[in-house]
């Protein structure tokens, strides 16, 4: 009997997951994208930098499953290497933006009135700036490295989440259990750590998935413009840009894969976020 009781929540969660095609599709697609970036390069061990001049711009074949580029480099090896270079920047940047947004939002929502007003006016300034233009400006000034790109992306992408968290915290502060905890002498850090973080967790998780997709798109766009991952490393954006430079030669095998992987990453984040939102909505 006790074992059945312990297994029932797991089975209930599993049944909800299996019944939500959107969430399952998002998780499967996310797993495939992560596999292509972090696992597949160690399985397909062909060097992405090896040049085969006699085999330049060859379509997919047995020797080169995804064809070759204009230098004769293996397109599949480049694609997998580019996936690693993209994800190793995009994922930490999304985590940094998520952390800054959450901390800033909680500080504004739980702080005194004057601090909330100050932080929100400062946030309005950040939101008024065109983030892509600011990102391009600093990317052109700062020496490009993975660490600098992570900092740039992370410190540009947090304002919208901060405002969302602040508004949700303000809405929850009027609830009875929060007021009771405050009357009992609970500190603001205790309220955030014990009570509020659990209430806003669904919003944080859903928006966190969207931030990952946005981060992948942004680093791909920067690389496409030549300001992201720098040579000799390649990213999905730089591979797409290189392929479009020789579009007149119709190298479809160089254009489609990186474009599809960027699209798949965005679709995975969107489907996962929508599925999680629906899952938590059904639990209420």
Image: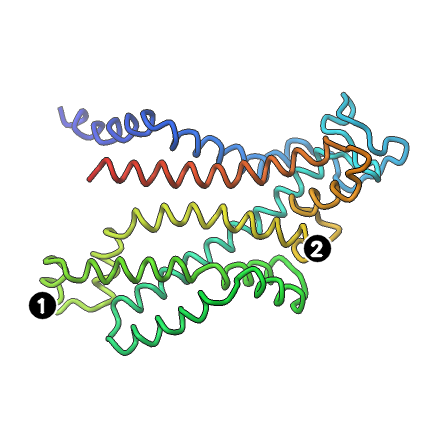
Relative to 123, does residue 197 appear above or below in the rendering?
above
Is 40 left, or right, of 208 in this rendering? right
Q: Nearer the viewer, residue 260 or 87?
A: 260
Q: Position of residue 226 (x, y in %)?
A: 70, 55
Query: Marks 1 and 2, Cα distance to the nearest angstrom?
Result: 56 Å
Write down the residue under mark 1: 183
Q: Position of residue 250 (x, y in %)?
A: 78, 32
Is 121 left, or right, of 65 in this rendering? left
Write down the residue under mark 2: 226
Is 197 left, or right, of 136 in this rendering? left
Residue under the image location 21 percent in, 59 percent down:
171
Dot label at residue 81: none
Outermost residue on the top side: it is 62
Q: Position of residue 277 (x, y in %)?
A: 32, 41
Q: Position of residue 188 (x, y in %)?
A: 22, 68
Relative to 42, does residue 232 appear above or below in the rendering?
below
Tag 2 or tag 1, which sits nearer the N-term? 1
Circles 1 and 2: CB distance less than 8 Å? Answer: no
**Colour scheme used in the picture?**
rainbow
Number of numbered discs overlaid on the protein picture: 2
Residue under the image location 28 percent in, 29 percent down:
16
């Amino acid at each position: 009997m006790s074992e059945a009781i312990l297994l029932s929540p797991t089975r209930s969660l599993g049944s909800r997951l299996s019944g939500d095609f959107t969430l399952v599709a998002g998780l499967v697609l996310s797993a495939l994208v992560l596999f292509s970036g972090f696992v597949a390069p160690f399985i397909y061990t062909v060097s992405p930098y090896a040049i085969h001049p006699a085999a330049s711009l060859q379509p997919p074949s047995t020797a080169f499953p995804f064809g070759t580029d204009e230098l004769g480099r293996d397109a599949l090896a480049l694609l997998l290497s580019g996936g690693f270079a993209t994800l190793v920047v995009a994922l930490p940047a999304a985590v940094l933006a998520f952390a800054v947004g959450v901390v800033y939002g909680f500080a504004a929502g739980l702080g005194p009135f004057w601090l909330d007003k100050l932080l929100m006016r400062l946030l309005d300034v950040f939101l008024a700036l065109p983030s892509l233009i600011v990102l391009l400006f600093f990317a052109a000034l700062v020496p490009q490295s993975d660490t600098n790109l992570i900092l740039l992306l992370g410190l540009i992408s947090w304002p919208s989440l901060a405002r969302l968290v602040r508004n949700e915290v303000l809405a929850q502060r009027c609830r009875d259990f929060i007021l009771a905890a405050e009357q009992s002498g609970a500190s603001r850090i205790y309220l955030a750590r014990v009570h509020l973080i659990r209430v806003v967790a669904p919003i944080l998780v859903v928006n966190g998935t969207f931030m990952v997709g946005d981060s992948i798109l942004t680093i791909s766009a920067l690389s496409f413009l030549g300001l992201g991952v720098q040579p000799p490393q390649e990213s999905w954006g730089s591979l797409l840009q290189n392929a479009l430079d020789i579009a007149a030669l119709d190298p479809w095998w160089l254009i489609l894969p990186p474009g599809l992987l960027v699209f798949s990453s965005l679709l995975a984040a969107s489907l996962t976020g929508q599925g999680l939102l629906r899952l938590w909505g059904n639990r209420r």
